[in-house]
Image: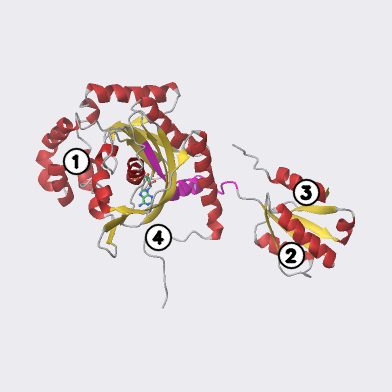
Amino acid sequence: MKFQVPRGTQDILPEAIGNWQALEARAREVSERHGYKEIRTPIFEATELFLRGVGETTDIVTKEMYTFADKKGRSLTLRPEGTAGVMRALVEHGVAQAGRMHRLWYVGPMFRYDRPQAGRYRQFHQWGAECVGSANPNADVEIILLLVDFLASFGLEKTEVKLNSVGHPGCRPAYAEKLRAYLAPFKDALCADCKERFEKNPLRILDCKVPHDKAVAQGIPSILDSLCDECRTHFDGVRAGLDALGVPYTLDPKLVRGLDYYTKTAFEVHDTARGAQSALGGGGRYDGLIADVGGPQVPGVGFSAGIERILMALEEQGKLPVAEAPLVFVARAGGDAVEKHALALVRALRKELAVTFDFESGKSLGAQLKHADRLGAQVAVLLGEDELAAREATVKDLKTGTQEKVPIADLAAHLRGRLAPKDAR
Ligand code: AMP
């Protein structure tokens, strides 16, 4: 019997984990620098939360949820996205209150039963941030910048910000009517899903992937011409904020996103070097979501970004590896005294550096250095009888082969300095 990972999932092996860890570490660092705090919520939630939050006419809810009954018959769903759970937590803990700000971030796996292909998985990972409690357009700008500056920190240049406003429940029905009027002559040729969307939620037709329906959507009236004064003023405020900071963006009136909770601002950041699965991340404002999941009327704006997609873009744009974690290898040659000192040295250095060594004593230095090479170590610390007598160690750069003697007392500081990332942010 041979087992394989379930379709649409993947193992992240030690060879690849460095990039994942570097990306997650950067996400944490950039989030915290913007004043965002981490929140962790369960990987499964009551199914009803996603029906209410994400929206009953979305593809995510109608086709893509991993829903199951637990042993007591409760309907639970593996989270297809992070925002609904975070809002549920704020409401449940009584901290979603008008006028109270929350800046939160998360990272973790999400689950969608979608057709797997390059850049699209059934278990994928998102980093996301939510700015809750402000209706100010500057909150939207902060959220967009958080994602844009994160991507820029890797030197990713081939990216484009797409921006739209999807209105709010006050002005959207009038636009939905305009859309129905425009689409009515094409209705019979639309796919079965879009025929249903036409009745229930015609904006969802703009998100249809069927080529014929996509072509029909090309000519639709722009939602930006149907915004009410409030939504128009908000959108102008977001644009002015981005313009003032010189952040380029493209207006895309067809950008509606795959979740129903968005109001006003919707945005995505795309990898312009890719045709398919080019969205690296996206988000928008969700002023009604907290009320929809049982809380007070509190506004919010957020985004989520796909870790797999960002790694793919980094690879394709030649930006990998992301700052490899430097590894030190301690090699030793000599009797019991050297062995004892070497093991103590490994333990001491491990307090601040990644350090490894060969368990077998008595191997030649050459064999040990070969082992170091296989592990990808950058530096070896060599300890022998002579070094021990002089209270020194030989530090060998495994890339260039150069070596120097360093007093053991200064070793940790020396290695730290030598291995510090050149590109410290
Ligand atoms: P969404 O939650 O649909 O707005 O998606 C936000 C981001 O998550 C997208 O821009 C992608 O980068 C990523 N993403 C969404 N769905 C998938 C998937 N099935 N596989 C991999 N990444 C995904």
Q: Residue 378 at x, y = what percent?
A: 69, 53
Q: Earlier in the sequence, mark 4 or mark 1?
A: 4
The amino acid type of the residue labelled 2 equals Gln
Mark closest to the chain's N terminus, 1 or 3 = 1
Mark 4: secondary structure:
loop
| Quarter of the figure with the N terminus | bottom left
Query: Of circles 2 and 1, which is in front?
Result: 2
Q: What residue would you read off at disc 4?
A: 9
Which residue was labeled with disc 1?
216
Mark yes or no: residue 34 visible: yes
Residue 306, magenta (yes or no): yes
Q: Between marks 1 and 3, how big is the CA–CA gap?
A: 68 Å
**Mark 3–mark 4 distance (CA, rounded to whole Å):** 43 Å
Residue found 43% across the figure and 44% down from its top: 39
Mark 4 vs mark 1, foreground winner is: 4
According to the picture, the residue beneath numbered tag 3 turns out to be: 411
Is disc 4 surrounded by few (<14), some (14 to 19) or many (20+) residues within 10 Å?
A: some
Image quarter (top left, top right, bottom left or bottom right) of the C terminus: top right
Chain-order first, disc 3 or disc 2? 2
